[in-house]
Image (cartoon, rainbow, N blue to C red):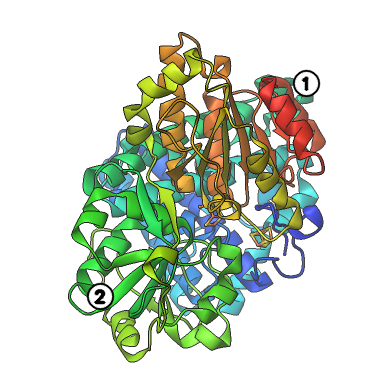
Amino acid sequence: MFCYQCEQTARGTGCTTVGVCGKTPETTYLQDLLTYSCKGLGCWAHFAAQQGVEVPTQVYSLLHAATFATLTNVNFDDARFKEYIVECHALREKVEAALKAAGVTATPPTPAGLPWFDLLPHPAAFKPSQAHLHNASIEHLVETGKKASLEHRRHVVDPTLLGLHEMICYGLRGLGAYAHHAEVLGERDASVDRFMAEGYAFLCSEDSLDLGKARQGLRSSATLAMVDATGAAGLTGMTILDRGHTTKFGHPEPTAVRISPKVGKAILISGHDLQDTYDLLVQTEGKGINVWTHGELLPAHGYPVLKKRFPHLAGNYGGAWYAQQKEFAEFPGPILMTTNCISEPKKSYHDRIWTTGEVGWPGVGHIEGKPGQTKDYSAVINKALEMPGFAWEPKEEEVKTVMTGFARNAVLGVAGEVVKAVQEGHLKHIFLVGGCDGHEPDRKYFTQVADGTPDDTLLLTLGCGKFRFYDHDYGMLPGTSLPRMLDMGQCNDAYSAIVVASKLAEVFGTDVNGLPLSLDLSWLEQKAVIILLTLLHLNVKNIRIGPKAPAFLTPESLAVIVDKWNLQVTDVKHPEADLAAMLQGH
Ligand code: SF4
Ligand code: SF3
């Protein structure tokens, strides 16, 4: 196997025997085969759209969901990957039938010169029948997956070109996640749908070879243009997700969230999905069960519809995903995992954790339900009723809380105060220290940066990286009513930060790069990739990412990105040097 899609990849180069995340070689090859199948479906859907033939919405829904399933720490269940592969080819047949019915006899291009499709037919021509796929054993699909694998491609493709292709592919994974989340909330955008197909089709096209043909063309290559287009689609993806959240649940408001236990039966909900959270809250109403959020669901407490209607939305338990094995083991109730990041469930809680949506772990209970369908959480609820729940709570005056809910509306609501603070010299700089968290000790850099931010600066945060410092007391911004640290929400809420930065730039008559603003981003998985591509598309310069550069970028491709956007890799050993540079606007 070979996988280097996330930051925690083995030795900083690639997982080759088993994933650091726990992904087996078998699952990796099945994901490779699914990606190959998505490329094929993308070719057909993109071609049909170009011919003016209507592509069934299901095609795009499957592309989003299946793509999301290949994102780091989402799905580890081989049987589910077989289902995605089968459905992918069923829908490809449907698109072919729609083309035929419209009288189009031409087929998508299947260029022969692409070295990375030499072991199987080109993805658009790779057409296993439904009967074959249904009867195929997992072992057989794994063997086919080897021929479609990144492990194979990396031996036949120039590493810079491969890395840029993979960056597009990982951007699509992040975009697929956003589009899928949005769809769950009843939102979709035709341009995002079409781009998912177009992006996959590009990776199968002759155009994507350009870099290999003319290296000096790297800066103006079609591949780099597609990197940019992926970022543009990312912005739309974030926009529709924000619309879904705020239309259904209102604009987040600054909210104190309890992080101390409270006596009573308890369910823990983790991941990013607000719709699942809402449905679970409805189904537990009046049952004497408290619902606790975990990790990236902390910001759920800021949404008016959730916080006003459900007093049993009790608080937040635990921090970032990577500590879940310990935290879940100690939680006195069942756990529902709605999206990434799942780690291998330990024996001690194996029988009281459920997955839902695109998340999966073999042998773990799964709650079914497609976007738009209401799921039945009674298995989780019954487990909570059987279990003891929290037996202890601190005295009222010792209860600890943290703040969340400073999304775009809340921050723009006090924009006048922010502008005044800048004009009066109370606010010298704004830092966005946010993104994903992970195991590595080097990630303490982000705490050191946050803790080192001077008193006359604001510290915006989002994503699960904040759990390293979310309970630190940074005080208030002098001369204002604003806490110095403002939690804007989940990694998904990077959109809020973009809107706030653009509005502030407007007020100050500059662009985002002209603001006293520094972005110091921690990354782990591919939602972070789409956020980065979106920021680069918006021409945001001087971004720092860390703790390491992506393994899929070779020094050559990184040099192009550094040259164009002055993207920097965090100096994890010298956070004070990074802080000083950021304060200077570098
Ligand atoms: Fe390794 Fe990350 Fe891939 Fe898992 S997702 S196999 S940790 S590179
Ligand atoms: Fe965290 Fe997985 Fe990325 Fe959503 S939950 S920020 S890592």
Name the residue located 53 percent from the left edge and 54 percent from the top edge.
Answer: 471
- 442 left or right, relative to 370: right
- Which quadrant of the figure has residue 459? top right
User: Residue 534 placed where, x, y %?
Assistant: 52, 32
- Give the quarter of the figure containing the N terminus: bottom right
Of residues 430 and 157, the one drawn nearer to the viewer in this rendering: 430
Please tell me how crowded label 2 is: few (under 14), some (14-19), or many (20+) other residues with Cα within 10 Å: some
Residue 209 seen anywhere in this rendered image of the structure:
yes
- State the residue position of label 1: 216
Please tell me how crowded label 1 is: few (under 14), some (14-19), or many (20+) other residues with Cα within 10 Å: few
CB of mark 2 near ligand 2 (< 8 Å): no
Name the residue located 35 percent from the left edge and 54 percent from the top edge.
Answer: 300
In terms of image quarters, where does ligand 1 lie? bottom right
- Give the quarter of the figure containing the C terminus: top right
Residue found at the very far bottom of the displayed protein: 386
- 542 left or right, relative to 529: right
Name the residue located 43 percent from the left edge and 34 percent from the top edge.
Answer: 482
Q: Which mark is residue 86?
A: none
Q: Which mark is residue 376?
A: 2
Of residues 327 and 535, the one drawn nearer to the viewer in this rendering: 327
Tag in front: 2 or 1: 2
Q: Classify mark 2: helix, strand or loop.
A: loop
Q: Give the answer, above or below, for where 147 lies relative to 244.
A: below
Residue 61 seen anywhere in this rendered image of the structure:
no
Tag count in the figure?
Answer: 2
Q: Give the answer, above or below, for where 405 lies relative to 289.
A: above
- Which quadrant of the figure has residue 448? top right
User: Residue 520 placed where, x, y %?
Assistant: 63, 36
Name the residue located 54 percent from the left edge and 59 percent from the top edge.
Answer: 70
What amino acid is labelled 2 in the image? Answer: Asp
